[in-house]
Amino acid sequence: FPSHDTLVVGAGYLGGEVSVQAMAGGWSAVPVVRSEIRAESLRGLFPKALAVDAADPTFWENLGGEWSGMVWSMAPSRKSDEGEFVRLHREGVGHASTWSRRFGVPMVYVSSTSVYAESEGGWVDETSPVGKDERATVMFEAERKTIAAGGSVLRCAGLYGPNRELRNRGEGPE
């Protein structure tokens, strides 16, 4: 690829660090976030930071293919309801994976081990049952869309940091 530009969709706790590490490795990261306030806070390090709705098909239709890679790291907003999570991960990842395949841009979908039904601290692997709750189902669907588009899935476990709390009952750290 002629450039080393990486689109990072979701520049919260994890996506922000992905952007910083990409930059440290000599790549140019373009964070995509939901609010102009967050985009503005990132523009000191990332002048091209975008505030857009990543589930809007128009964004993906108007985005060219001159990217070296894309990381989907969109965590649910603390202020969003369950429907927003579903919309971002079902519709948003659908549009992103279609765009990725169309332009041949490598995609990584950052998922969670919370896709698994196991919530008592046991071991899980690819043969473990998937959870039946909506978040698990939607993330698992997003993983499949990513893989079908030729992308990769990274399932993270135990991501805790500033303003993220550990919850009981297997609900995840969102």
Image: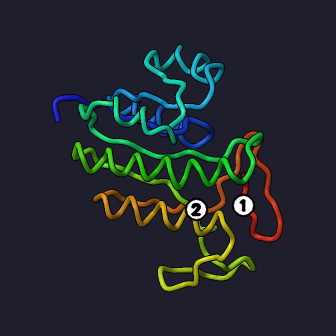
SS category of the residue bearing label 2: strand
Q: Which residue is mark 1?
A: 172
Is 103 placed above or below 47 here? below
Viewer-nearest residue: 102 or 1: 102
The residue located at (73%, 43%) in the rendering is 80
Which label number is shown at residue 124?
Answer: none
- The picture places residue 68, in percent across and down from the top left corner, at 27, 38
Viewer-nearest residue: 92 or 39: 92
The residue located at (67%, 82%) in the rendering is 122
Instruction: Give the residue type at disc 2.
Output: Ser
Left or right relative to 27: residue 37 = right
C-alpha span from label 1 to label 2: 9 Å
- The picture places residue 22, in percent across and down from the top left corner, at 40, 35
- The picture places residue 56, in percent across and down from the top left corner, at 49, 37
Instruction: Give the residue type at disc 1.
Output: Gly
Is 174 placed above or below 19 here? below
Q: Which residue is mark 2?
A: 112
User: Do the residues bearing badges 1 and 2 touch, measured as CB atoms within 8 Å?
Assistant: yes
SS category of the residue bearing label 1: loop
Is 70 placed above or below 160 here? above
Left or right relative to 4: residue 154 = right
Q: In terms of image quadrants, where is residue 121?
A: bottom right
| Quadrant of the frame with the N terminus | top left
